[in-house]
Amino acid sequence: MKTKQGKILSIVLLLVILYSSLYNSNNSINFLNNSYKNTLNSNIKSAYVEDLDRVIILLTNLNYHIPPFVLDMNDDGVLETIIIGDIPGEEGKKVFFLNKDRLASGWPLTLLWDMQDVEILGRMDLNKSDPSFITKYTKTENDKQITSFFAVNRRAEINTTFGFDISGEFIQGTIMHDLNQDGEKEFVLIQKKSSTIFYIDHQGQNFTNWPIQINDTVSFIPPIAEDITGDGEPEIIVTTDNGFVFAWHLNGTIVNGYPLRFPIKIIHPDEELREMPLIGDFNNNGEKELFIASTFSILHGISLNPANNKTWSTEIPLPVYITTQGTVFDIDMDGELEILQLLNDGLAVYGVQGEEVVNEFYYLAGSGYVGTPAIADLDRDNMPEIVLISYFNAIILEHNGILKESIPRTLSISDKISPLIYDIDNDQELEIVIVSARGYVIIKETNDFGVAPWISDLGSPTHTQNYDSDNDGLFDHEEEIIGTDIYNNDSDGDTVIDGLEVNQYVLNPLASDIDSDTDGDTILNIDEVDIYNTNPLNPDTDFDGLTDGEEIFIYFTNPFSSDSDEDGIPDDYEIEHDNILDPNNPYDAYEDPDEDGLLNVHESSYGTDPEIADTDFDGLLDGEEVYRYYTNPLLPDADADIDGDGLTNVQEVDIYGTDPSLPDTDDDGYTDGEEVAAKSDPLDKNSFPGDKNYTWAYSFLALIPIGAITTVIVRKRIIRRKLL
């Protein structure tokens, strides 16, 4: 016969079971909805992957000192990277071909040849069907120097339809370009010892009146091809060590008024020139000037119009040799070109104002700078940044010379390799790419959009400034890669100029797509950039599980912060529990609407439900599980024994007063469970199992019916459940 107490207990247990069953049924529906939402959010996030700075490791037993080359081998709009390493102790090289920042299948190509002064020149479409990249190197045959040209296709095969030799050793910086616009590429190169200038066709044959030998020395300065006469055809320009400037038409006749001469050696008899000169209209007078720094810390300039006969000279902080190279760019975007001269200890930037060379700014910090400055907008502020490389740091400067970021480097860089900036992984975002002397390709993400603003350490293929013929924001070499018209700033006629489509809105400059929503977040690309400043490639700019469109148009939350009200609770969690939480109200984080002892901000941290006092339905309040019993509020573990002493956590806390996280609370060598079973005191270090002095303290427990103890425990849990 059941007692009245037993009947009450049975009824309570039945109600608990029914309630749990009903709630779990509803909770299953909620779980399915949440599961679907989590899957959706996962898909949203997977639509855009935030690339991290990373390193590609090539073979580390080679030496890498040859500047890498960037090109599109098959006109698919994806840039490939060619890197060459020296095999130590041997004359050969290994050639690496990276496609989407991965080594292409079949590479590297091993060339066990005598190869000195190796130089990658660019792409040539041999037989109109087999694109290859052309490489020049010097070898020794019968004690004579021979310069050889060969071609390699993307399958790592030597293309036997191309190749020729020229006697002699030539200066690094060969031009390979279609200068005469006959549909084939030509070569311009300078023989070292004889200072002879060669202009040859794609088969290695000299053009009429070429080669031309000059009566001066050219030891390091590469040639330039630039239209300085205004006849629509480039002239070949050569600057000598001693400051003479020669210019020839492609037919081999010298330009009237040439050679010109810089006023060097007047103050310093040993003064010479070592770097490639810079050409541009620096003072906006409609004529071109040539500037070059010397080995005696002087920046020289000369008008390329012989009738002008104007020269400039100004002192600079350090001498310039072959390890540092200047470049040309309108760095402050005021319509006037600046000279960015790299020095061993930093950067000096100059402008030309009429008769004067004016210093714009210096960044002189550290030492060991090498190569050429690289320039690109790296942070979507529509102003360019400058990247410098030293043996110790990678430096990113604002356009005005203010330090933006200094990245310490533990990997030494080779003596002349410059940073390049281009989309190496075809994600429509730019990366800074640096090759170390030991085969580490360091990739730093910029999160700015674009294709290839700085893919050559010597500027354009003709060694002049990076031209933008139609002033659309894309360099001519970028337009050749993309396929847009270098003389039409809106190739698709959709009223958005090509440069904005590529560098700002991530649109296709060859198709009218101004209404595109690339990332599918319900916001047009143009609006994402111009109005909201969100990422048009990422549907969830702040990675909080809510699309940018949802945040802006539905929830009115901040698309740049996963916690719009900064209360410690993520937006998606607050929206999931919008009955009690508001992603724009910071005060609801410190409320406890389910009265379980956990504030909302802590429920978010533990993953519990802020609307249910007992998330796991094990009879224990979430707050007590966290703060009192050390159980998991997400698992039904009311009977858990986390310290393995034979007593449940609830028993230890509510009955015996022992520590549920310590198997031997009084540290007497016996577990709490052993002491309780033996009727010794688990809280007294001097009480041991078998000690008769303490047995009386527990003997009375045997007189209490088990049902009564059970009733007490269950009633405690039922009382807590009433708080639900």
Image (tube, rainbow, N blue to C red):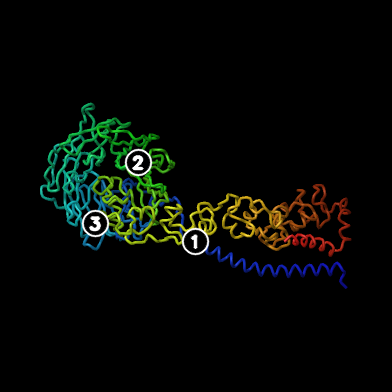
Number of numbered discs: 3
The residue identified by callout 3 is 124
Report the residue at 32% width, 33% height from top.
359
Q: How many C-alpha atoms fall within 10 Å of the one at disc 3: few (<14), some, or many (≥20)?
A: many
Q: Amino acid at mark 1?
A: Ile
Q: Nearer the viewer, residue 319 or 153?
A: 319
The residue identified by callout 1 is 44
Q: Amino acid at mark 3?
A: Met
Q: Which mark is residue 332?
A: 2
The secondary element bearing badge 1 is classed as helix
First in residue order: circle 2 vs circle 1: 1
First in residue order: circle 3 vs circle 1: 1
Residue 643 seen in the current view = no
Q: Which mark is residue 377?
A: none
Would residue 420 appear left or right of 703 to someone viewing this image?
A: left
Mark 2, mark 1: which one is toward the viewer? Answer: 2
